[in-house]
């Protein structure tokens, strides 16, 4: 069979109108007999006909698809903001597809290159890179873009973020007022990642002398990390100072949970724990501890509203506006 | 500007060759001056030119994209099998995009309808439905398809699954031999979901009289569930029987964890816990308990190998083969 099979050919071979084939392709099977549907299906199968979805895209420049690029879908934050974006886009008759950068800059690059080659109407990007130039060199088409979660400090795009600085500061103030004089902050490497930097800065407005433990998530979790924490803790306890553990990411707290359980840390009134925590898991494990809860669903939904508006109103251009979705402490 | 802008027009307006525009579109910027790249970028922006990726698809019928449809990306199982699939497809120069059915049959339907309208080369589907007819009515094109995780009992597609029956049976035997005479199975609703049915059947070969508690995940988690468990447990304890808790899904165990902690269940030698558990979280929380660990990454990678072979070898057709990736108990 030739590659040039068209919808006309399919209609002719099936002995039906083009409109009927079109209805078939759009799944409107209630508007034809089962016999007709089966005949069309058979011919499409035999001729290996591919519909004109691609052709339509060329004409309208409008695929109806928004690419959502997540930093790492192993994080509940990422899957949840996708769910928020997806539900809003659905209301606007747009489809969301998800790309995973798998915490690898090279994978993010491949994703952006691929998106550049396709006809997406919009993109919601949770970047790994902190360099806007990196994105601009890879995505050279006029794809409507919103940056989510992290700050690229670039006016070309609107962005949606949690109030990382304020939320970290608010939580720190609460514990400081409750006589926690020492703080141990546990984070993935802070350099270059705006989210972590903002959180740390917020904490430092209250606790200038933060004890920071950075854990590289790419490597297997090491027992050595427990020792670091143990040692810091012992020094603080000798001085009789109340110590707060502040995890900048929920998964790190989960890594430490069984250690805390074994060491009896959960029942020691001179110790407390808080974290940026998005799932119900931590709240279930530690019902008596106050956590900072982001709203990734709302972050994604907000980004999707912005994209949907930009897509429907072609004259709308990004003003580099920053939208803040507050986290809640409690 | 007309909608009919072509790559020829862009090249002419930029005063460069078509090959140069093509290189630009493919991100090969090292092969032109920055000035040239900027000029092309400006013209593409002004004319709103959309490349011929879509046109190319029409000619080759080969988008290079595999659609991966997950039942719910809130489950680690789903994101992890996507990562496995994605890494294998990358090696075959194919791109994976992820769709989330969000545990809703209607969303799955929308995803399949959408995929039917696009030019995907292949699809890996973790279905919510248990009816193959449902899928066939929505996807009417010859898209290479592999079914993952769940069984649709249909020879049209190859499928990749965990050995749910065997793994559940093996774990049950272990506990039975260790004098656990009673078992409480905690699961989402079992009816219609092959994975859960297989697991339950495997358990029932060892424990014909299973005490089954079904929890509807769509509703908020109820304290009532704790009472059910408490009551069953008390009856067993009166009779002096050792009881095993068997969770068919990890998330359910996490819901019960703080309850177990409070009730002192974790230190009672007459009680034990096992679960189908995919993440490191449970192993971290309950290091001394034996779990059944699936390998979602390998499941996804296996499905991707099958799809990649079918795509590269056009004559390859599905034999309705069932591929089993064993789970490990320990």
Image (cartoon, coloured by chain):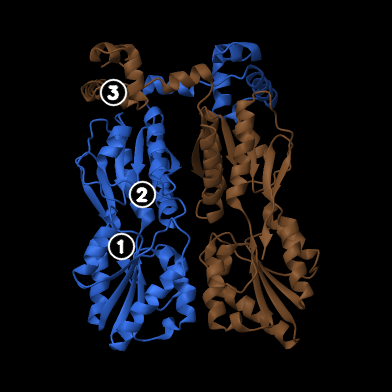
Chain colours: A brown, B blue
Q: Which mark is residue A186?
A: none
Mark 1 Cα shell of 10 Å, populated few (<14), some (14-19), many (≥20): many
Q: CA distance from mark 3 to mark 1?
A: 38 Å
Instruction: Look at the image and tell me whether residue A141 can be seen.
Output: no
Graded by Cα atoms within 10 Å as few (under 14), some (14 to 19) or many (20 or more), the crowding at tag 2 reads many
Foreground disc of the pair 2, 1? 1
Where on the picture, by quarter, is residue B47? top right
Q: Are marks 2 and 3 on the same chain?
A: no
User: Between marks 2 and 3, how big is the CA–CA gap?
Assistant: 27 Å
User: Which image quarter is the N terminus of chain A in?
Assistant: top left
Which quadrant of the figure contains the C terminus of chain A? bottom right
Q: Nearer the viewer, mark 2 or mark 3?
A: 3
Task: Give the crowd class for mark 3: few <14, some 14-19, many >=20 residues within 10 Å.
Answer: some
Q: Choose between B229 and B145: the one closer to the eye.
A: B229
Question: Which residue corresponds to the image point at 33% horizontal and 46% vertical from the top-left?
Answer: B127
Q: Residue at x 64, y 25 (%)?
A: A313
Q: First in sequence: mark 2 or mark 1? A: 2
Give the letter of the chain under mark 1: B
Which residue is pictured at 60% across the width and 33% down the height? A308
In percent of width and height, residue B158 lies at 25, 43
Residue A300 lies left or right of residue B220; in this view the side is: right
- Image location (x, y in percent) of residue A231: 65, 81
Which residue position holds label 1? Answer: B327
Say whether residue A103 is left or right of residue A145: left
Vertical placement of residue B113 versus A286, above or below: above
Q: Chain of mark 2?
A: B
Task: Calculate the distance from the C-alpha at mark 2 to the C-alpha at mark 1.
Answer: 15 Å
Residue of label 2: B301
SS of the residue under disc 1: loop
For disc 3, the marked residue is A48
Q: Chain of mark 3?
A: A
Task: Determine the secondary structure under disc 3.
Answer: loop
């Amino acid at each position: 069979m030739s590659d040039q099979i068209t919808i006309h050919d399919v209609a002719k071979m099936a002995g039906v109108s083009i409109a009927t084939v079109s209805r078939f392709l759009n799944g409107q099977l209630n508007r034809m007999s089962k016999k007709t549907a089966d005949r069309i299906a058979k011919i499409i199968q035999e001729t290996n006909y591919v519909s004109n979805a691609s052709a339509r895209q060329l004409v309208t420049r409008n695929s109806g698809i928004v690419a959502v690029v997540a930093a790492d879908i192993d994080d509940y934050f990422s899957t949840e903001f996708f769910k928020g974006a997806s539900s809003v886009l659905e209301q606007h008759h747009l489809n969301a597809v998800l790309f995973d950068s798998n915490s690898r800059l090279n994978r993010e690059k491949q994703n952006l290159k691929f998106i550049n080659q396709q006809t997406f109407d919009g993109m919601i990007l949770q970047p790994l890179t902190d360099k806007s130039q990196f994105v601009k060199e890879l995505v050279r088409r006029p794809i409507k873009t919103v940056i989510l979660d992290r700050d690229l400090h670039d006016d070309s795009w609107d962005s949606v973020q949690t109030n990382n600085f304020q939320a970290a500061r608010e939580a720190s103030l609460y514990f400081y007022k409750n006589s926690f004089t020492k703080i141990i902050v546990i984070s993935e490497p802070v350099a270059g990642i705006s989210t972590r930097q903002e959180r740390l800065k917020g904490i430092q407005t209250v606790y200038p002398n933060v004890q920071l433990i950075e854990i590289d998530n790419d490597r297997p979790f090491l027992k050595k990390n427990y020792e670091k924490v143990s040692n810091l803790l012992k020094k603080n306890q000798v001085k009789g100072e109340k110590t707060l553990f502040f995890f900048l990411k929920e998964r790190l707290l989960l890594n430490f949970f069984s250690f805390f359980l074994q060491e009896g840390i959960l029942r020691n009134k001179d110790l407390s724990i808080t974290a940026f925590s998005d799932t119900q898991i931590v709240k279930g494990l530690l019902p008596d501890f106050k956590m900072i809860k982001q709203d990734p669903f709302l972050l994604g939904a907000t980004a999707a509203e912005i994209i949907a508006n930009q897509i429907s109103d072609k004259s709308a251009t990004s003003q580099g506006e920053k939208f803040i979705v507050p986290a809640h402490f409690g």
